[in-house]
Image: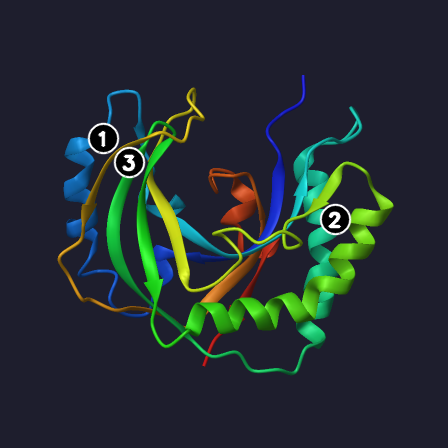
Amino acid sequence: MQSRPWYLSVTAIWSYANSGYEGMKAEFDKYLNRIPFSHKVVPESFRHFTVLPLIRITKWPVEETGEDIALNYLSEFRNIMEACEKQFNKIMVKPLEVKSYDSGTTIQFESVDNSVSLLREEMKNIFNELIVNIANDNPNIYSEIEHENAKNTGNITYGSISRSYSNEGHALRWRMPIPNDQIIEFNKVFLLASDQFLSNPAAHNEKDRLEITLV
């Protein structure tokens, strides 16, 4: 039986924010009292938003695992990143609202000073050639940056505080604005291999991910 897909991405893990997040944790958690019974709370260490999805791995040989394939490709992305001499600017976001869907409850963020959009475009330029080559060589690996979506375009991004593991529907149950102008600042993001929820060791093991410093 095939497992869920594996991904390579550039990801901001909320608990690694260098400022602003500690003051917002209680604000985010109070909305958990409203989540549907079918949802499970996303553990603190798994909460994140995707800065840029890179590739999606959907199938692999029975003698291998999705993690094996993802970590092999991660080394190729790591080589490009470690050879890159470009400095990347820090990203700043403000929480806008909470949206609860059948599939999960999310915090919606808006970038400050176009910082997320700028980093996304810089990362696309660095990785695009490798992604195209990988996707062309393997029919079970897909580029995640070819088609614009909310995870790779513009200044809006989002991350889950609860998920349904049985319902993937996107019907909106309720939404609420977050009455706070707190800015959350990140001076690091991670190039990592993970499942969709960051619920695997590869997303949190230092040897299986590359820290990217933002200045």
Q: Of discs 3 and 2, which sits in the foreground?
A: 3
- The first of marks 3 and 1 along the sequence is 1
The reply to whether the C-beta atoms of the residues labelled 3 and 1 are less than 8 Å apart is yes
Q: Nearer the viewer, residue 150 or 95?
A: 150
Q: Amino acid at mark 3?
A: Ser
| Element carrying mark 3 | strand
Q: Of discs 3 and 1, which sits in the foreground?
A: 3
The reply, left or right, for residue 7 in relation to residue 83 is left
x 42%, y 24%: residue:
165
Question: Marks 3 and 2, Cα distance to the nearest angstrom?
Answer: 35 Å
Q: Of discs 1 and 2, which sits in the foreground?
A: 1
Q: Which residue is mark 3?
A: 100
Q: Which residue is mark 2?
A: 72
List x then y, in percent, for residue 189. 48, 64
Q: Which residue is mark 1?
A: 35
Residue 75 marker = none
Q: Amino acid at mark 1?
A: Ile
On-image quarter of the C terminus: bottom left
